[in-house]
Amino acid sequence: MTPAPALRRLLFLSLFLSLFLSLFCGGPAVAALDEAPGFYVGRPILALAGHPDAVALLRQVSGGQQRALAAALRAPGPPIALADGRYLFAHACLATGCAMDGVFFGFDVTASRLYLLLNRDGTHVLQVPPRGAIWPAALADPVAAFGAAPRRLTFEAP
């Protein structure tokens, strides 16, 4: 087979696969998850990392901490909960404790915005939004339950 027909065949196959996946694996099913944050409540924190809107954001913000973040997201912790009908959140910690190796993960399903704290080897290595940004008041108690947030984390007035 010459290169041109092989390339056309590959292009056709990729377009067909893309259409098939969007029709049968995405579309209304994924949209229904976005509209129903209650679907995630009670599940482990790793399920929240798989939220369709959160996946790309996590890749962008994790930088050189991808392995540490992946390990922390697989650690045990309380299940995902919902605050103010729009903030999904959970935290997880390795056996060494949240201050040593833990993650707090919040996600605003309305604005598709991440709230993330990652501690690794006793050091605070990642915060999204960055230091100085104001976090929603609805996440103040969940972050306090995480117990390993930086001292200067600022929350909006309730």
Image (spheres, grey):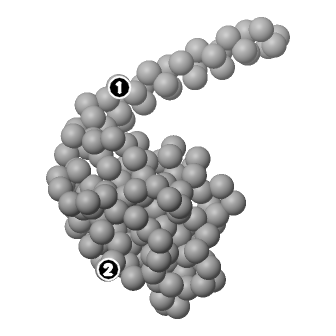
Q: Residue 89: x percent and y percent?
A: 32, 63
Q: Which element carries disc 1, helix, strand or loop?
A: helix
With 54 as the anchor, is 1 left or right in this view?
A: right
Q: Is residue 104 above or below residue 56?
A: below
Look at 44% across and 68% down and name the residue there: 153
What separation in Å lies between label 1 and label 2 (alpha carbons)? 41 Å
Task: Report if residue 97 is visible in the image.
Answer: yes
Q: Nearer the viewer, mark 1 or mark 2?
A: 2
Give the number of the disc on residue 151: none
Q: Residue furthest bottom?
A: 96
Give x and y (percent) for residue 53: 40, 42
- Is 69 positioned to the left or the right of 52 in the image? right
Mark nearer the N terminus (1 vs 2)? 1
Q: Residues within 10 Å of mark 1 (few under 14, many from 20)?
A: few
The answer to whether residue 75 is seen in the rendering is no
Q: Is residue 88 left or right of residue 2?
A: left
Classify the position of the N terminus by image quarter: top right
Q: Position of residue 64 (x, y in %)?
A: 69, 60
Decide: marks 1, 2 in contact (CB < 8 A)? no
| Image coords of residue 15 (percent x, y) | 53, 18
Q: Residue furthest front?
A: 157
Residue carrying label 2: 145
Please give the residue where the numbered disc 1 appears in the rendered image.
Answer: 23
